[in-house]
Amino acid sequence: MEEEKKKKVKLSNVFYYLKKTYQYAKQDKKYLFFFLIGSILLSVINVVAPLLSARQIFYLTNEFWTQLFAVTLLIFGTEVCRNVCIHINNYFINKYFYSVKKNIQLDVSSKILQIQTGVLQANSSGTFIERAGNDTDTLSDIFIQGIDYLTYLISVIGVLFSILFLNTAIFFLYLLFVVLLFFAQKFAAKKIQEKNKIRKKKRDIASGFISELVRGAKDIKLLNAEKSFLNKTDQVIQELGEANYSWARTRSWFRFLNGDLRDLLDLGILLLGIYFITHKELEVATMLIILSYRGHIISISSNLEHFYDIIKQFELAAERIFEILEGEKYPKEFFGDKQISKIEGNIAFKNVFFGYEEDDMVLKNISFQIHPNETVSFVGKSGSGKSTIFNLISALYKPNAGEITFDGIPLNQLDKASIRKNMSVISQNPYIFNMSIRENLTIIKEDLTEEEMIDACKMACLHDFIMTLKDGYDTIVGEGGVTLSGGQRQRLAIARALILKTEIILFDEATSALDNETQYEIQKSIQNMQGEYTILIIAHRLSTVINSDRLILIDNGSVAGEGTHQELLKNNPIYQKLYELELKDDEKK
Ligand code: ADP
């Protein structure tokens, strides 16, 4: 009973997903229309043509050899027409397939970009890569196959009726075969589905792990951890292989069963045919017609074999995709609808509490105020919560309690563009696209003029360096900007911010020690922007904060002091200690 209930719910799921998937298929209905016309034609050829022609032949002549010749010709002619129709159908269905797939993939990709950062980080990237790739393939493929099946089903029903009309006994034999096959398939599908679920899970794990291995290759080498990573790779691939094998074995067992059923059917038809012909109850020509239908009925076997499998695969793939598209498993970023086209630069935190985990608050009752065009540095021990403050300002995470405002408007009431278009984030290791320097800059502003580009690079103290390159602005920077140093990547990111002219600039200073020259250039480029932009800096070295208008000292998730470097040095014991520690560190070097 419980099982029955579960099944029903699942079937309604399938219909729900089919309906949803159809939304992506609506745009190119014309291909579907041509495909359906082709399918109807195919059904007519399959069912009606042999029947009608056979009657004609019987009517025209009674001569045995003429009948045999005509029927043979007819079967051949029908086959040719059928193949032409199938070919045309394939053309339209393929066009339809790519269009449906493209629409789903585009929506899945856009929804992945909307998923909350914390949720993205908590899941392996392989999970999303698999869903945007393989699963959308399966979904659109099966959706199309489903339509194909429907037309196929209609023609099989037609064929069965024709057989009923020609010979009742053979009809019942065919019917018995179809019913037996149906139940065998139902059972098989359940078993295959279980194995397939395990297989998919293992595939997710394996592709997630391998993408980690590729992404982290450099660090794996430096950690000398190749061996343990390869051992783990061996293990995940082995587990995937076993799951694949078990799935394939179950499938092949059921194929074997199908084959046996088919042989029994063949034997039954032949015996019945011989019996009826010898008793003069069946014409040889009619027997040939029935045999020409045999192919369609037999194909039920391979089609039904796939049918349940495919429905289940569709359900699985759809479940995984719609989890991203509309489920609550991967919550999307949530924005309000208030708009400000140009933010002035007032940022305020009022009694903000935040934790990546509900029960572990990283920021505890933080309050501070930033004024337009101020340059403010956040200082404090590593792990005190500075980057977390940036994550909240850039709306990658939402506070658990308290309020953050931009120009007095609560951040959660602002729409996405009002936040992101007014802000540039220059991270410690900004992502630079594998294109030329020029393209890296024009991609964010398509109508960027040469003059604007050079000005921005000059302000970012990058122009002189670019001029030393053989291809200048057309130099390709390699994947992730590998051919640039950390400092150069940051300056290119500063140039991007200058081109976008966003009022707020969040700058996360590199923790790794940059050489003095680079550090000086970055300082200079920030100074170039000072006074015109609201600049917030995460300072990992106190030597770089001297030029800031103000420092905010963060200690263990709370504000432990505010003021200039000199003021804090004079009055704040925590800052004094931090400064002493850094001096000692510098002496050691
Ligand atoms: P800082 O920038 O001052 O070095 P962070 O804001 O990066 O400090 O980190 C503050 C605390 O939050 C640390 O204990 C850190 O381990 C934790 N933390 C940072 N990022 C995450 C994250 N994505 N998920 C869980 N905990 C995190």
Image (cartoon, helix red, strand yellow):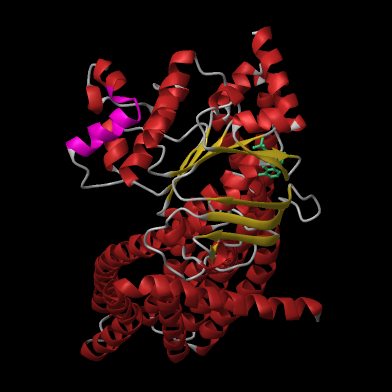
Where is residue 403 drawn, in percent x and y? 64, 62
> Residue 376 magenta-drawn?
no
Q: Decide: is 12 above or below 543.
A: below
Residue sitting at x 29%, y 28%: 458
Q: Front-most of 93 and 69?
A: 93
Q: Quadrant of residue 411?
A: bottom right
Measuring from the top left, give residue 158's x and y in whole percent.
42, 85
What residue span does the magenta drawing correspond to?
450-463
- Quarter holding the N terminus? bottom right
> For residue 459: magenta?
yes
Q: Is residue 17 visible?
A: yes
Q: Is residue 482 visible?
A: no
The residue sitting at 63% across, 53% down in the picture is 119
State whether the magenta stretch is mostly helix, strand or loop.
helix
Which residue occupies the foreground of this view, 533 or 119? 533
Task: Write down which quadrant ligand 1 falls in.
Answer: top right
